Image (cartoon, helix red, strand yellow):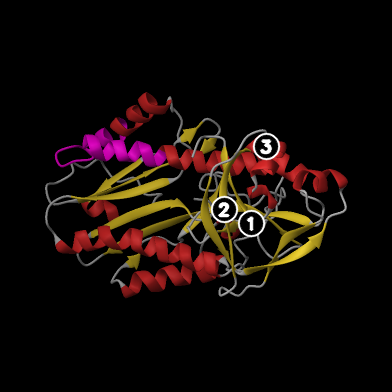
């Protein structure tokens, strides 16, 4: 997906070539996708311009049912932010744009009837914000794929040296010089320590586990990204390496399945999944808001900014500025008896 791309799930007239040419000025490619928890009904269109473009007086419209067995087939279209604004102009007032999870794992905008508990902060500024956060994560994924390909985190390398190598690579690849929180490389027993600790520098060992936690800023949007590396043949460390993304996907599935899920509920589910796999959560939360630098600024509503047992508010909500809340799912799993931990984090609700 390009830097300015957003996903729009279309199930009706916006999939038609002649409508796309009229609304977007081009034919838009897409991929088949499905939207669970909705069904289709019909709405009568009275806007003569929309009728002229579509050739139809009655259009399909999404109705939320909350039943996962109800599924709507459609197409995930990749649009620019300006094209999404053009789609807003095309749709009549019966439709409300909302951000929803799709069956593919993507999150996309849809036009649906009324309010259904999904995120509905849907102006062009929000669309640009979503596109910026997704693009930032895609750059972080590319950055850390190159980190692995070059072996920048490796036995015999100091934690600080590895951190500096990644910093320099981010600058070389993307011109990135700013990071919104401290750059972290931890190895061995240091992997047990929480974010706010500052252990002394350590050389990564031949049979170590190590992890990276970086918050690079790409243009004006921040990523928050973490990955774990295992060296040697220790089966428990390799099990941890396997379990982290598996539990992340299960946590994301729990979030997608419950439109009203709270921070407390998601934390409890992640803790349950970790415990079943034989791990303990190493910090007091399992994620945080993104787009508002919550780690470094305590705005008096700390619990509501985190996925934690103290947060009884729904994660799908708007903040005090009226913007949609977007989230990072952050997993820090530890085995204190064996003396190591691992880390995995990225966007929860957008990509």
| Percent coordinates x, y for residue 100 in the rendering | 60, 58
Is there any visible trace of residue 253 in the rendered image? yes
The picture quadrant where one finds residue 281 is bottom left
Q: Magenta stretch?
A: 140-164
For mark 1, what is the residue?
11
- In the image, taking residue 179 as reference, residue 168 lies left or right, namely left
> Which mark identifies residue 75?
2
Q: Using the image as rendered, state which of residue 13 and residue 288 is in the foreground.
A: 13
Which one is earlier in the sequence, the residue at label 2 or at label 3? 3
Residue 166 percent across, percent down from the top left: 32, 33
Q: Which mark is residue 21?
A: 3
Q: Is residue 146 magenta?
A: yes
Identify whether 344 is placed above or below 179.
below
In the picture, measured across the screen, residue 152 lies left or right of residue 227, that is left
- The crowd level at tag 2 (other Cα within 10 Å; few <14, some 14-19, many 20+) is many
Q: Nearer the viewer, residue 293 or 227?
A: 227
- Residue 240 placement: quadrant: bottom left
Q: Residues within 10 Å of mark 3 (few under 14, many from 20)?
A: some
Q: Nearer the viewer, mark 2 or mark 3?
A: 3
Per the model, the C-alpha gap separating discs 3 and 1 is 17 Å
Residue at horizontal 41%, vertical 62%? Answer: 249
* Residue 194 visible, this angle: no
Binning the other alpha carbons within 10 Å of mark 1 as few (below 14), some (14 to 19) or many (20 upward) gives many
Local SS, label 2: strand
Q: CA distance from mark 2 to mark 3?
A: 16 Å
């Amino acid at each position: 997906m390009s830097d300015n791309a957003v996903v729009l799930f279309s199930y009706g007239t916006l999939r038609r070539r002649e409508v796309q040419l009229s609304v977007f000025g081009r034919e838009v490619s897409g991929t088949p996708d499905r939207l669970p928890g909705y069904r289709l009904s019909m709405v009568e269109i009275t806007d003569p311009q929309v009728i002229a473009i579509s050739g139809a007086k009655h259009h399909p419209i999404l109705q939320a049912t909350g039943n996962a067995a109800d599924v709507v087939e459609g197409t995930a279209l990749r649009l620019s932010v300006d094209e999404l604004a053009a789609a807003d102009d095309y749709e009549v007032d019966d439709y409300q744009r909302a951000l929803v999870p799709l069956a593919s794992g993507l999150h996309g905008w849809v036009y649906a009837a009324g309010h259904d508990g999904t995120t509905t902060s849907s102006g062009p500024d929000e669309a640009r914000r979503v596109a910026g956060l997704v693009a930032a994560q895609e750059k972080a994924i590319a950055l850390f794929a190159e980190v692995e390909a070059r072996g920048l985190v490796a036995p015999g390398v100091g934690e600080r040296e590895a951190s500096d190598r990644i910093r320099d690579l981010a600058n070389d690849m993307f011109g990135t010089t700013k990071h919104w929180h401290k750059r972290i490389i931890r190895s061995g027993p240091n992997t047990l320590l929480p974010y706010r600790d500052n252990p002394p520098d350590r050389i990564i060992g031949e049979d170590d586990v190590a992890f990276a936690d970086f918050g690079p800023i790409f243009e004006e949007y921040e990523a928050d990204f973490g990955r774990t590396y295992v060296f040697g043949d220790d089966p428990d460390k390799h099990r941890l390496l396997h379990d982290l993304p598996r539990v992340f996907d299960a946590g994301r599935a729990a979030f997608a399945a419950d439109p009203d899920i709270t921070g407390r509920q998601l934390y409890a589910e992640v803790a349950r999944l970790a415990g079943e796999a034989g791990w303990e959560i190493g910090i007091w939360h399992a994620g945080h808001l993104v787009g508002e630098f919550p780690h470094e600024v305590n705005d008096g509503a700390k619990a509501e900014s985190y996925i934690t047992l103290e947060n009884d508010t729904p994660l799908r909500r708007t903040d005090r500025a009226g913007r949609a809340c977007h989230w990072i799912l952050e997993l820090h799993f530890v085995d204190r008896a064996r003396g190591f931990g691992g880390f995995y984090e990225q966007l929860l609700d957008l990509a």
